[in-house]
Amino acid sequence: MDFDSFLTSLGTSFIIFVVLMCLFAWLSSKPGNTVVYYPNRILKGLDPWEGGSRTRNPFTWIKEAMSSSEQDVINMSGLDTAVYFVFMSTVLGIFALSGIILLPALLPVAATDDSIQAAGKNTTSIGTFNDLDKLSMGNITAKSSRLWAFLVATYWVSFVTYFLLWRGYKHVSELRADALMSPEVRPQQFAVLVRDLPDLPKGQSRKEQVDSYFKAIYPDTFYRSMVVTNNKEANKIYEELEGYKKKLARAEAVYAESKSAGKPEGTRPTIKTGFLGLLGKRVDAIEYYNEKIKEIIPKLEAEQKITLKEKQLGAALVFFTSRVAAASAAQSLHAQLVDTWTVSDAPESRELIWNNLNIKFFQRQIRQYVVYVIVALTIMFYMIPIGLISALTTLDNLKKILPFLKPVINITALKTVLEAYLPQIALIVFLALLPKLLLFLSKIEGIPAVSHAVRAASGKYFYFTVLNVFIGVTVGGTLFKTFKSIEKDPNSIVDVLANSLPGNATFFLTYVALQFFVGYGLELSRIVPLIIYHLKRKYLCKTEAELKEAWFPGDLGYGTRVPSDMLIVTIVFCYSCIAPLIIPFGVVYFALGWLILRNQALKVYVPAYESYGRMWPHMFLRLVAALLLYQITMLGYFGSKKFIYVGFLIPLPILSLIFVYICQKRFYKSFSDTALEVASRELKETPSMEHIFRSYIPLSLNSEKVDDDQFEDALSQASRSGSFVV
Amino acid sequence: MDFDSFLTSLGTSFIIFVVLMCLFAWLSSKPGNTVVYYPNRILKGLDPWEGGSRTRNPFTWIKEAMSSSEQDVINMSGLDTAVYFVFMSTVLGIFALSGIILLPALLPVAATDDSIQAAGKNTTSIGTFNDLDKLSMGNITAKSSRLWAFLVATYWVSFVTYFLLWRGYKHVSELRADALMSPEVRPQQFAVLVRDLPDLPKGQSRKEQVDSYFKAIYPDTFYRSMVVTNNKEANKIYEELEGYKKKLARAEAVYAESKSAGKPEGTRPTIKTGFLGLLGKRVDAIEYYNEKIKEIIPKLEAEQKITLKEKQLGAALVFFTSRVAAASAAQSLHAQLVDTWTVSDAPESRELIWNNLNIKFFQRQIRQYVVYVIVALTIMFYMIPIGLISALTTLDNLKKILPFLKPVINITALKTVLEAYLPQIALIVFLALLPKLLLFLSKIEGIPAVSHAVRAASGKYFYFTVLNVFIGVTVGGTLFKTFKSIEKDPNSIVDVLANSLPGNATFFLTYVALQFFVGYGLELSRIVPLIIYHLKRKYLCKTEAELKEAWFPGDLGYGTRVPSDMLIVTIVFCYSCIAPLIIPFGVVYFALGWLILRNQALKVYVPAYESYGRMWPHMFLRLVAALLLYQITMLGYFGSKKFIYVGFLIPLPILSLIFVYICQKRFYKSFSDTALEVASRELKETPSMEHIFRSYIPLSLNSEKVDDDQFEDALSQASRSGSFVV
C-alpha cells in the first residue's frame, strides 16, 4: 500500500465520520427518535433531554459526556460499565503518555537516518519505501547507536503501562468495594448457589436434605432454600401462554384501530388455526386466543406443581439473613469431599443460567477442557481462511488470480479505494461471525451465570483476535517467502514476526482509523437500530409492548467490545516504537471511544446484569499479555537489527511477569470473592427476606400457590427473620 | 559388584539384624530400661507392660503390634502417626500386589532368554554378567516379543498403585474428618491466625484495632484476641530464670545426697561465680541461686509488662466461640486488599513459630522464592560430591587412585566386605547431614507452624534424595562413558538413565537390604538412646527432671523418614519390571518398617504436634511423582530395547496426571481447609473459652497479672461466652 491510498483511506473514513455525526445531530433532535437515542433515560423515568429544552446545540452531548462523573455512569449504567471506562481511560492514558515522549523523540531520530534509503537509491528497490516508512524504525541502519533511543522508548512504554495499570486496578478494587458495601439491599448478596448435592438419603426430599444440612452449620443465619427444578416443560407452557397473550393484545389493538377508521363497530380480526396460520378453519382471533389462554393456565399450574414436587434437581439456592454469612459461606469448603456441596456466590437472578446448575463437578471440568480443545481447533482452522484472505486481497494478487478483473481494477480512483479498504473490510466482516459461537461454547462449559460466560467468551475471543488477526496478518504477509525458514527452526517465528512488522504498519494504521471513524460513527448515529425501529413501528408493531420491544436497546456488550479494543491495544503496543506514528491513532481511537460510549452508556444502553467489576482482572491480564507480546516482539526486532545491546531488553518481560504476580496477589482474590469487611457494612434497612427469596423464583414458576407446595416447612422460619440486624 | 559380595552383604546385614533383635529382647525386659523402651506408655500413665507381667515371651511385641488397631495408634500417638502407617501399608500393598503377579510371571520369562548370554560366551565380556542379571530385563534380547510381558507388568504396577492410592486418600480423608469432628475441645479449632495487620490508625492500639475489626464482622461469635508480641527479651529472661531454677534443684539434690552419705549435716555445694564457673569468688550454691531467682522474677514481670504494652506486632490470634466460625473465618477473605488481614488456621500453640508471625505478606513470598533458589543450588552442588563418591568407591577405582591401598584391598575377605558396603555407607552418612539444613531453610520462609515447616523440609528432602541419590548414582555410574552423548543432545538423558538402570540393580538391592536390616534393627533396639541415657543417668543427672529429660524420646520424626522411604519407593518402582527381584526387598522393607514402627509409635515416641494428617497430600503427590518417573524410565528403557510397541506406554504418564488431578480436586481442599460440615458437629461439653485462650499464652508471658494489663477490655466479654452452643 502506498502513501496515496493511505491518505485516501483516511480521508474517506473521515468524510463518512463527519456525515454520520451530522446525521446524529439532526436525527437525535427529532422527537420521534428519542426512544432510539435516549432509551436508558426514558426507561429510568428521566426526561430525554437534560433541562427539557429541545432546541439545543447539536454538540451538547459532548459537553454532557465530558462533564459526567464516574458516579453518574454507575447510577445510569452500573459498575460494569464504569469499569469499562476505567479500562478505556487507562489505555488512553498509556498511549497519551507514551506518545508525548515517543513522537517528538523517535520521529526525528528515524527520519534523519536515511542510510537505508540512500543505499536503496542505487538499486531498484526504491519502490518499496514510502514516506510513512521513513518515519519508522525500519529506516534505522542496523547496529546504529540511534537504536538506543528506541530501546529507552520500549522501557518508557512499559513503565507507563505498569504505573497506570496499578492505579487502575487499585481504583477498580475500591469501586467494587464501594458497590458491594452499598447500603442497598441486593438479593444476590444474601444468597449462595449450592451445586453437586450428593445422592438423596432414603426417605428425605431434596428440600429437607438441603435445609437440614445448612441449618446444622448456620443455625442463626440460615433463612431458607430454593431447590433448583427442571423447568423445561413449565417454561415451554409459560412461553406458549405469553405468546398467546401477546397475540391477543395485538388482535385487540387491530380491532380497536379498525373501529376508529370510519366503521364504529370495527372489523374483528380472524386467523386460520392450521399450519403457520395459512391453513385450517378461519376463526375469530380474539375469541380463539382467549380460549387458548383459558386452556393453558390450568395446564401451567398443574405443570408448576409437578415441577416443584417431582422435578427437583441436585442444586439449590440458599438464602441467609446476613450478607456476611452469605459471603463467608460462598468462600468456605462445606463438605469433606470437595466435589459435593460446592458452594459459590449466587449470581443475580436475571443472569442465572438455570439449565447449567445441575451439571456435576467433574462433568464441568470435562466440559471445560473439551471446549478449550474446540476453541483451540477453531483458532487453528480459522488461521487458514484469514491467511488466504490477506494474501489474496492485495490487488496485485487479485489481478494475477482473477485476470478478468484487470480492467475494473485499473481505473485509478476505484483502484485506490479498493486497495485501501478491501483487506480491512474482509477482516471486519469475518470477525463479526465469531462471538456468538464463542458465547455458546462458554455456556455449555457449565458456567452458572451469563456475566461469567460472557467473560469466558471474551477471553477466547481475545486469543482468537490476537493470534489470528494480528499474528496471522503480520506473519501471513511474509509467510510465503519465509515459510521454509520456519519449517527448519520453529524458534525463528519471533524473527519472522519482527521482520514482517514494519511492512504491515500502514495496513494497521488504516485498520485503526477505519475502526474509530466508521465504527464509532455508526455507534453514535445508531443508523441501523433507527432504521429497524422505524420499519418495525410502521409495519409490525401494534401494541405498546411490541413497540417497546422494538426500541429496547440491549446492553453495551463489552464482551465483544473488549476483545476488539484489545486488538487495537496489541497493535498499537507492538508498533509504538517501530512506527510511533500509530500512537496518535490509538489515542484518537480510545478518546473518541470514551466520548461516544460515555454518551451511549448514559443515554442508550441498559445493562443486562451487574457483576461488580469482575471483568477487570480479565482486562488487566490481557493488557499485560499484549504488553508481553510487545516486549518479546521488540526483543526479536532489535535482534534482527543486529543491535548488540538487545540484552538490555531481557529484564522487561521478567518485570512484566513479576508485576502481574504482585497485582494478582494483592487484588485478585477480592474480585473472585467478597471480602467480609466489605459485606459487613450496615444496611439502610432491614432486608425483606421474603422479597429476596421471591426475586429468585423463575417467571414460569411464579404463582401465588408456590409457597404452599414447596416451601411449606421453610416458611415457618420466615417469621423469625424480622428481628436481626446485619 | 558380583554375586558373592551381594550375598556377603545380605548375610552380614542379616546377622547384625539378628544380634540387634536379641539385644532388644534382652534389654527391653530389664526394669531399669523401661523408660527407654516404653516412654510413651509411661508418660500416658500406663503400665509399661500390658497386663503387667514382666516374665514374658520376647516376641510378644510382634503380637501386640500386629493386633493393635488404627484407633490404638491414634490414641497413643495421634492422627499424623496413623497417617504415616496408612502410607506404609499403602506402599506395602502396592509392592505385595505387584510382586504376586510380577515375580512368577517375569522371572521365568527373563531367565529362559539366554540369547545375550549365549552371544556373550563368544566374546570376552562374559564377566559382566552375573547370576542376578540373568533374572532381569537386561537379559532379554532386543525387539523380543517377550517384552510384551514386561509392558503388561508396567501397566499392572501402575493400576495397582492408582487403586491403592485412591483407597488410601479416601481413608485418610475420613480419618481427618473424624478427628476434626471429634467432640473433644481442642483450642486450635477455636482460633485463627491473623497476619499482615495494616498500619495502626492514630490513637488506636493494636488490641483495639483487631477487636473492633473482628467484632464488626462476627458480632455473635467473636470471643477475644491476642496480639502477638516480640517476646525475645522476655524469653531470654525466662530462660535465665528456668536455668537457675534447674541449677537450684540440682544443688539441693547434691546437698541431700551428701547428707545421707555418713555426715548427717551434709556438704553444702559451692560454685565459683565467674566465667563458666571456673573463676571468681566461691559461694554457697543454693543461696546464690535463690538470690539470683529472687532478683530475676521482678525483672521478668517488668519485662512482661513492657512486652505486652509496647512490643505488640502486626499479627494476632483471634478466638471464636464456635468451631464453625473459626473454620469459616480461616477460609474467608477479610480485607479488600488481599495482602492485609490475612487469616489462616491457627496451629496448635506448641508448634507456633512466634518469630515468623510478624513477617509481611510479600516478604514471605520473596523469602519463599529465595529459599527455593538456595535449595535448588544445594541440590545441584551436592550432585558433584555424590557423583565423585559413587565413581571413586568402586574398589578398582580406589586401587587406581590410591595405589598404596592395594595390599590391603587384595585381602579377599576384606575386599568382599569393603566392596559390599563402601558405597552404601558413604551414601548414608552423607544423607544424615542434610535434614537440619532443610528444616532451617523452611523455617525462614516465614511459615507459622512447625508441622508445616517439617512438611516443606520433607518435600525438599524428597527432591534431593530422588535427584541426587537415585538419578545421581544411577546415571553417575555410566556418566563418564556417555558424557559426550548427553552433551550433544540433552534429551538422551532418559536413554542414559534407562541404559544404566540394570547395571545398578544389585547396588540398590544391597542398599535396600542394609536400610531395613541395620536401620530398622537399630530403630527397634534403641541402642544409641539406651547408652546415652545410662551415661547421663550415671554421671550427669541429679534430679528427677533431668532424668526425664535424659530419656524423653522425642517424636517419630516422619519429616525425615518419609523422604528416605520415598527413595526406597522410587528405587523399587523403577526396578520393579527391570529387575523384579527388588520387589521382595521392598516388601520386606515396608513390612518390617510397619511392624517395628508400630511398636515404636505405641510404646516409644511422643508426638510433638498434631496436624490432622496434612502430611498425606504430600506423600500422595510424591508417590505419584515416583510412579511418573518409573513410567517415563520404562518408556526410555523399552525404547533402548528397540521394542516397536513402546508407544503403548505413552498413555500411562497421561493417566497418572489425570489421576492426580482428579484426586487433588476431590480430596485436597479438605486437607488445606476444614470442611464446615465437619466443624459443625456438636461438642461433648461447652468449651471453656478462658482455658482455650490461656493455652496460647507463651510460657515466658504466663503470669497471673497478664489479664489486667493487656486483656482488660476483652475480658468483659468472657462472661457472655457461657451461654452458646456450637
Image (cartoon, coloured by chain):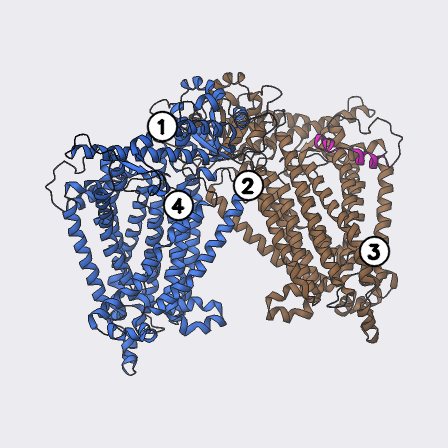
Chain colours: A blue, B brown
Q: Secondary structure at mark 1?
A: loop
Quarter of the image with the N terminus of chain B in it: bottom right
Q: As displayed, is residue A5 above or below residue B550?
A: below
Q: CA distance from mark 1 to mark 4?
A: 25 Å
Q: Which residue is mark 2?
A: B447
Q: Give how far across and how far down residue B56 sits, in percent.
A: 88, 32
Q: Is residue A167 visible?
A: no
Task: Read off the residue under disc 4.
Answer: A454
Q: Amino acid at mark 2?
A: Ile
Q: CA distance from mark 2 to mark 4?
A: 39 Å
| In the displayed structure image, the side of residue A207 where residue A508 appears, left or right | left
| Residue displayed at 44% across by 52% down | A658
Specify the quadrant of the image occupied by residue A47.
top left
Magenta segment range? B54-75
Residue bearing the label numbered 3: B9
Residue B298 picture quarter: top right
Q: Residues within 10 Å of mark 4 (few under 14, many from 20)?
A: many
**Could you tell me residue B352's position as x and y percent?**
57, 35
Q: Which residue is mark 1?
A: A185
Q: Residue at the spot x=12%, y=40% of the render?
A: A54
Q: Could you tell me how far apart the alpha carbons at marks 3 and 4 are, in whole angstroms?
A: 68 Å
Measured as percent of width and height from the top left, residue A709 is found at: 47, 23
Looking at the rendered structure, the secondary structure element under dot 4 is helix
Question: Which secondary structure lies at badge 2?
Answer: loop
Q: Earlier in the sequence, mark 3 or mark 2?
A: 3
Answer whether labels 1 and 4 touch (C-beta < 8 Å): no
* Extreme residue in the front direction: A281
Q: Nearer the viewer, residue B468 or A183?
A: A183
**CB contact under 8 Å: marks 1 and 2:** no
Q: Is residue B616 left or right of residue A13?
A: right
Q: Work out which quarter of the rendered image holds the C terminus of chain B and state it.
A: top right
- Check disc 3 and report its element: helix, strand or loop: helix
